[in-house]
Image (tube, grey):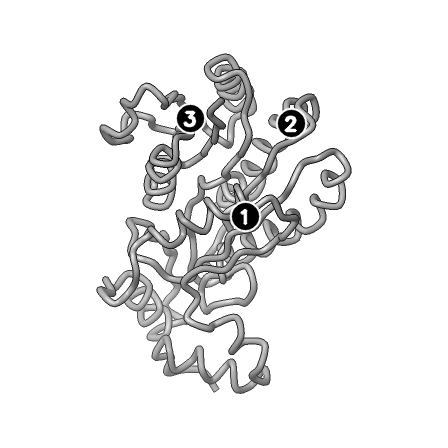
Amino acid sequence: MSKTLLITGAAGTIGTTTAQYFLQQGWNVVATARNSDKLGTWAQSPNVAVLSLDVTNEQSVASAVREAERSFGSIDVLLNCAGVGFGGPLEATSTQQFEQHFQTNVFGLARVIRTMLPLFRRQRHGTIINMSSVSGRFGLPFLSPYNAGKFAVEGLSESLRFELRPLGIKVKLIEPGGIRSTFSPVFVRHEAYEPDLSAVIERVRRPDPTLPGPEPVAKLIWRAATDGSQRLRYKAVTKGALAINRILSEELWYRLIQKSFNLKKSK
């Protein structure tokens, strides 16, 4: 019997690539997105159930999970891939903007997990895979909302696996570095933080042909879903950033990030 993956944010670069990879391995895929019309022709496969799902809406999440179970009978893996990017000086960020960011990247992820858990408990098995980032392990300039969200996902996942492991439910974290994708954070501005702010925005949005595509991340998600281990963290395409962060002193790391983003005003 084929296994089933439910994926949020299936219209994004990583979501689409991962869904296609699992289909190639013979899995069923429940492809969900806030706007399911954005899914490609791959979603027309008979092994795909396309559902609209807004992770910020409780009713939308509950409806999608019920329909997914009806479509394939069970769900083996939940991949929380829905996410948005938001950055800029904290001084220029309103409480509402910060909350909206967390509604998708943190509260939305928790909402989907919470809705899936009764099914996973009844099955006595299931794997939850949360998309994090190297930005969940160290901070980057003018990305405090995004970093805060990814740090929250890391802590939530690490704690949650203690709750769920006795129930036969695994929790995994995927921590990719930079890849070629359509993901582009929205930034707010404040003139007091120029020219460093513009330098960061230019660096983040600049196309980088040297970056790998999303395929290594999709394969790592497959590994996390199928290796049968209790391993928590899976790193992909980090170019040694996590190891360098652990080795360098705080000041040397600061200088390295300063140089990487071409910051001028930093002391």
Query: Real-space Cα distance between discs 2 and 3?
Result: 17 Å
- Tell me which amino acid carries mark 2: Phe
Q: Choose between 224 and 206: the one closer to the eye.
A: 224
Determine which of the numbered discs, if any, sits on residue 130 in the image. none
In the image, which is nearer the foreground, mark 1 or mark 2? 2
Query: Real-space Cα distance between discs 1 and 2?
Result: 35 Å
Q: Quadrant of residue 216?
A: bottom left
What residue is shown with label 3?
28
Is residue 123 toward the left or the right of residue 192 in the image? right
Residue 248 percent coordinates (x, y): 56, 84
Determine which of the numbered discs, if any, sits on residue 95 in the image. 1
Query: Real-space Cα distance between discs 3 and 1?
Result: 40 Å
Q: Residues within 10 Å of mark 1 (few under 14, many from 20)?
A: few
First in sequence: mark 2 vs mark 3: 3
Q: Residues within 10 Å of mark 2 (few under 14, many from 20)?
A: many
Looking at the rendered structure, the number of numbered marks drawn on it comes to: 3
In the image, which is nearer the foreground, mark 3 or mark 1? 3
First in sequence: mark 1 vs mark 2: 1
In the image, which is nearer the foreground, mark 2 or mark 3? 3
What residue is shown with label 2?
120
Is residue 3 toward the left or the right of residue 24 in the image? right
Q: Secondary structure at mark 2?
A: helix
- Give the residue displayed 54% in from the left and 43% down from the top: 129
